[in-house]
Image (cartoon, grey):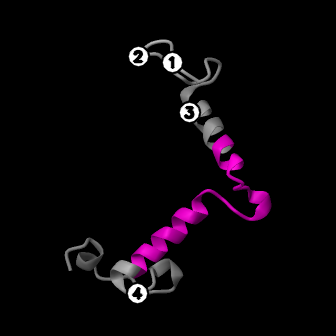
Amino acid sequence: MLAAHRSASTSHPALKLHQWKNHHHHHVVRSCGITRDDGFTPHGPRHRYANQRYKAVSGAESPVRGGTAPDRETDRGRG
């Protein structure tokens, strides 16, 4: 979809912006084969990456995966 002019919207005129974003997001996710029916959610890959990155940076499992929470300074990247 193309906008008619530089300040025009490309969202659906009958939908509010948040409705259009949700519709578009779910369409893209479904088109990639990510469905709850298959046991996947869009946030699953984000959570996996975040936990892998946490371990790579800290050398320990994240608290959500059973690791212990680091002290505040380390957690903020100052340790």
Distance Cα–Cα, label 4 vs label 3: 38 Å
Q: Does 32 sit above or below residue 68?
A: above
**Position in image of residue 57 (x %, y %):** 34, 78
Indicate yes or no whether the magenta region holds residue 1: no
Q: Residues at badges 4 and 1 in contact (C-beta under 8 Å)?
A: no
Q: Quadrant of residue 37?
A: bottom right
Left or right: 61, with 21 as reference point: left
| Helix, strand or loop for disc 1 | loop
Q: Nearer the viewer, mark 3 or mark 1?
A: 1
The residue that mark 4 highlights is 60
Q: Which residue is mark 3?
A: 18
Mark 2 and mark 1 residues within 8 Å of each other at the beta carbon: yes
Q: Which residues are magenta?
A: 27-55
Q: Residues within 10 Å of mark 4 (few under 14, many from 20)?
A: some
Instruction: State which mark lies toward you, 2 or 3.
Output: 2
For the residues labelled 4 and 2, the Cα–Cα distance comes to 49 Å
CA distance for labels 2 and 3: 21 Å
On residue 6, the disc is 2
> In this view, which residue lies farthest toward the right?
37
Q: Earlier in the sequence, mark 2 or mark 3?
A: 2
Q: Amino acid at mark 2?
A: Arg
Residue beneath disc 1: 3
Rate crowding at label 3 as few (under 14), some (14 to 19) or many (20 or more) other CA atoms within 10 Å: few
Tell me residue 2's x, y (percent): 54, 21
Q: CA distance from mark 2 to mark 1?
A: 7 Å
Mark 3 and mark 1 lie on one chain; the one further toward the N terminus is 1
